[in-house]
Image: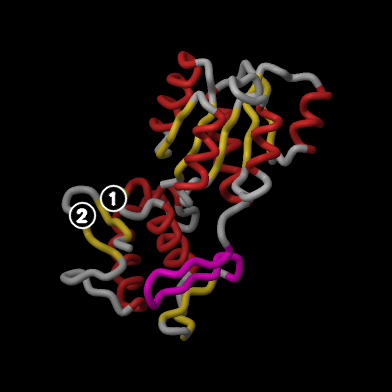
């Protein structure tokens, strides 16, 4: 589950955006204060993306964006009523990665967030003795490459992206293009069983993939 920081001083708008983002499956930290947002970013190293307004108290959103860029490369989406080309150019010059002019439909913000997270997805991830190179689509145990099928690799990445939270078989099937709908739910367990075997994992004493009764699976680490 991606963790987002929302900086928005219109509390009614902030509440609406937080509701939509949480319904979409994101974890959200929200603040109306640019100063507090800087403190959050320095204290919490697991923020995956920042959404910020331009008209803020204490400092302008452009200045906040500039300050964030002095210590963080976390992707930034500017969400503002200032939709003219001058402000857009200034936003990109101060380090924003995307610019969304209000009013907009929440589904567009969610689509842009997902696109941005895909762009900035880390190329390498390490969990104990399991290391994964996303761009090369490689998984290694103790430095040795394990031969995963495309479907097994995609399931592993999907579980990792939603780690510590159980995901249903339906969600896995819906997210993996290689799984045919007519056999998806029946085949999920087979794919996971094969994936566990290749990872050296155990259903009874799981290290990586845990079965969640009546729901599906979750990545443990």
| Residue 152 placement, left or right of 119 | left
Q: Residues within 10 Å of mark 2 (few under 14, many from 20)?
A: few
Residue 81, x across and y down, in percent: 67, 17
Task: From the viewer's side, name the closer residue of 192 and 75.
Answer: 75
Mark 1 element type: loop
Mark 2 element type: strand
Task: From the viewer's side, name the closer residue of 5 and 169.
Answer: 5
Q: Which residues are magenta?
A: 123-136
Residue under numbered circle 1: 166
128 shown above or below 145: above
Q: Residue at x 41, y 80 (%)?
A: 141
Q: Residue at x 45, y 64 (%)?
A: 151
Q: Is residue 212 magenta?
A: no
Task: From the viewer's side, name the closer residue of 44 and 133.
Answer: 44
Residue 167, x across and y down, in percent: 31, 49
Q: Residue at x 18, y 49 (%)?
A: 214
Quarter the C terminus occupies: bottom left
Residue 87, x across and y down, in percent: 78, 24
Q: CA distance from mark 2 to mark 1?
A: 7 Å
Task: From the viewer's side, name the closer residue of 42 and 210.
Answer: 42
Q: Is residue 133 magenta?
A: yes
Q: Earlier in the sequence, mark 2 or mark 1?
A: 1
Determine which quarter of the picture holds residue 127. bottom left
Residue under numbered circle 2: 212
């Amino acid at each position: 589950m991606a963790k987002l920081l929302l900086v928005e001083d219109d509390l009614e708008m902030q509440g609406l955006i937080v509701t939509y983002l949480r319904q979409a499956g994101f974890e959200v930290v929200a603040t109306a204060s640019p100063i507090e947002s800087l403190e959050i970013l320095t204290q919490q190293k697991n923020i995956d993306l920042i959404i910020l307004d331009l008209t803020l108290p204490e400092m302008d959103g452009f200045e906040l964006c500039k300050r964030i860029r002095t210590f963080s490369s976390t992707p930034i989406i500017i969400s503002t009523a200032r939709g003219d080309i001058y402000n857009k150019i200034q936003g990109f010059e101060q380090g924003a990665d995307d610019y969304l002019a209000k009013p907009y439909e929440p589904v567009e913000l969610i689509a842009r967030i997902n696109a941005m997270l895909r762009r900035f997805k880390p190329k390498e991830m390490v969990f104990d003795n399991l290391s994964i190179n996303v761009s090369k689509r490689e998984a290694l145990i103790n430095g040795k490459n394990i031969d995963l099928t495309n479907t097994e690799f995609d399931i592993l990445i999907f579980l990792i992206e939603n780690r510590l939270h159980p995901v249903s078989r339906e969600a896995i099937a819906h997210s993996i293009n290689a799984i045919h709908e007519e056999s998806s739910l029946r085949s999920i367990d087979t794919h996971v069983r094969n994936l566990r075997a290749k990872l050296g994992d155990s259903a009874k004493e799981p290290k990586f993939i845990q079965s969640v009764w009546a729901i599906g699976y979750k990545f443990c680490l």
